[in-house]
Amino acid sequence: MIKIALVLAVLVIGWLLSQMGLKAFERAMVKATRPLSSVHTDIILRRLGQAAGVKLKALRVFDHPMVNAAALSDGTVLISAPLERHFRAGRVSPEELAAVVAHEVGHVAMGHHAQRVALMPFQLLARNAVVVAIFRLIPFGAAILAPLIVGFLITRLTRAQEFEADAYATALMVRAGYGVKPLTSLLGKMIQLQPPSVDRDRLKAAEQSFWATHPPSEARIAAIRAKAGSWGA
């Protein structure tokens, strides 16, 4: 009983520390970003918000060398500076930007942030448990294999979450009247939108990697089309 209580105490403390760390990180992120507002973004937020039945917060821009986007636990959607530049230059259409927002809102709506924070305390315990289990079979390989196994499980989770966020975005985009084409068109050119300094061949290979946190774009596009097709959209 004492051991079980100690394990539970470690998990609770770990969860609390994870929550505190997340909140501190998000406050720092907001301070380091700037708002993005335009006629197009206001329309995007209004249409998607009406479709989702919530009031979406204003977009914010963060400095990052890659075309990327993220969402905070309170629903604030962040886009990277290169993505903003592509949008302002017309290389990313308003409909495609709406697809980005819909996907990130999907992560929040599906509770992915809460899932990841809740799992943080378990990762170290799981890694130690795997080390002990493997050590009995392969004493000299446990320290190497344990991180790989836990890392593999985490990437399976993040890939599943990306598919879930895509499915949510598909439904939201259809309901908002955008359709699914902006989702698939943006995914299809994400690598080409990356800065010239990025090795696109290497990025493409990384996307296909067994250890990638995101599914390959082709798989995501196929899943979106299949989902929309099942609805007759």
Image: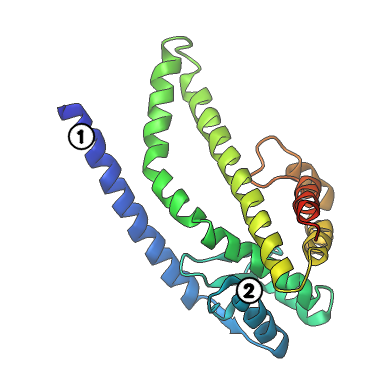
Mark sitting earlier along the chain (2/1): 1
Name the residue at 54% across, 28% down: 149
Name the residue furthest bottom: 39
In the displayed structure image, the side of residue 109 where residue 118 appears, left or right: left
Name the residue at 67% across, 55% down: 167
In the displayed structure image, the side of residue 223 where residue 172 appears, left or right: left
Q: Nearer the viewer, residue 210 or 104?
A: 104
Occupied quadrant, residue 60: bottom right
Q: Nearer the viewer, residue 172 or 102?
A: 172
What is the CA distance from the residue labelled 2 to the residue labelled 1?
46 Å
Q: Which residue is mark 2?
A: 51
Name the residue furthest left: 2
Q: Are marks 2 and 1 in contact (CB under 8 Å)?
A: no
Q: Is residue 45 above or below residue 109?
A: below
The spot of residue 169 in percent (x, y) is 67, 62
Q: Is residue 72 above or below residue 86?
A: above
Q: Is residue 77 above or below residue 16?
A: below
The answer to whether residue 82 is seen in the rendering is: no
Q: Which residue is mark 1?
A: 6
Q: Nearer the viewer, residue 182 or 154?
A: 182
Kindly state the secondary structure of the residue where label 1 is placed: helix
In the displayed structure image, the side of residue 150 where residue 93 appears, left or right: right
The answer to whether residue 76 is seen in the rendering is: yes
Three-letter code, disc 1? Leu
- The C terminus appears in which quarter of the rendering? bottom right
Name the residue at 40% across, 48% down: 118
The spot of residue 110 in percent (x, y) is 53, 56
The spot of residue 173 in percent (x, y) is 71, 68
- Label 2 crowd (10 A; few <14 / some 14-19 / many >=20): some
Three-letter code, disc 2? Ala
